[in-house]
Image: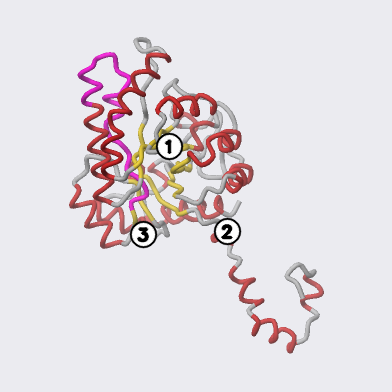
Amino acid sequence: MTLSMHRRDFLKMSGGAMATLASLGTVGSMAADDPAKKRPIKKAIMYATIGYPGSVMDKLKAVKAAGFEGVEPMSHMKQDEVLKALEETGLKAASVCCNTHWAKPLSHPDANVRREGLEGLVQALKDAKRYGASSVLLVPGRVTKDVGYDDCFKRSVAEIRKAIPTAEETGVKLAIENVWNDFITKADQAMAFLEAIDSPMVGWHFDIGNVVKYSPPETWIPMLGKRILKLHVKEWGKLKPNNGFGVRFFEGDNNWPAIMKALDDVGYQGWGITEQPGDQSKDADLMRDLSNRFDKILAS
């Protein structure tokens, strides 16, 4: 008898037949069909968005209690403090976010600023190595009134190439994130950028919420495919507070079933890292709600 049987037929089964099914593990397989376990994507939270108060240890204990498996530390934190909290809670470092890429972008017209930005990226790679993270999130540059698209492209590619030897030495990959920086707003631009760098040590940190403004995330995923190293899982809603990012999961414009199907189709099985606003995780109940909503996304 198959699991596709109609419910009314199932309920008509005798107790003996039910016992037989149970002994064969069929009933158990039904119970195991937990929506939260539908996909092997591991669930983490970006450290900079944790609203829960207290020390690094306090925050990570709350993250663990809410049901997360990992965290994305910022670079340039106190390594020993982060490592101790990871070890005590059992959380894994899903990624490390470079903490210098906005203030010291690799696309800056001043060579000294670019050098400092590169030094910050190198430190992020070393932090990731210490924490056991496999990639570093990097915003590659910014288009401004003083930096055009082509200049941003050329400068950031050149600086990223300088960091590749450190990436190879540490075994930590660089993951380029799509953000609201007026740079790379289309999937084909993302692929062109990766092709220009031309290194297996550089891939993509795909931010789902950031692209909703420009085009559906599910249209980016097939193009990026296996180049997606990590995910930022974020909701975005048109005409909502905080530039559209103030909404909770399932209260914005993201088409989660289509997004998750696209990820299934490319075989993504890595980390999903929530970057929801901190007011959604400022106490234990809200942290748990965020975690539960994340589970529903993974079951979409």
Q: Nearer the viewer, residue 34 or 55?
A: 34
Residue drawn at (38%, 43%) of the image:
278
**Residue 203: image tag:** 1
Residue drawn at (52%, 45%) of the image:
249
Is residue 108 located in the magenta-colored stretch of the structure? Answer: yes
Q: Earlier in the sequence, mark 1 or mark 3?
A: 3
Q: CA distance from mark 1 to mark 3?
A: 28 Å
Q: Identify which amino acid the numbered label 3 is placed on.
A: Lys
Tag in front: 2 or 1 = 1
Residue 287 image point, x, y percent: 41, 53
Is residue 82 located in the magenta-colored stretch of the structure? Answer: no
Residue 94 image point, x, y percent: 37, 49
Q: Compared to 193, does 21 lie above or below?
A: below
**SS class, disc 3:** helix
Q: Identify which amino acid the numbered label 1 is placed on.
A: Gly
Residue under pointer 3: 64
Q: CA distance from mark 2 to mark 1?
A: 26 Å
Q: Quadrant of residue 152?
A: top left
Q: CA distance from mark 3 to mark 2?
A: 20 Å
Circles 1 and 3: CB atoms closer than 8 Å: no
Packing grade of label 3 (10 A; few <14, some 14-19, many >=20) is: some
Q: Residue furthest top?
A: 146
**Residue 38: image tag:** 2
Tag in front: 3 or 2 = 2
* Span shown in magenta: 93-116
Q: Quadrant of residue 3?
A: bottom right
Q: Identify which amino acid the numbered label 2 is placed on.
A: Lys
Assign the N terminus to one quadrant of the image: bottom right
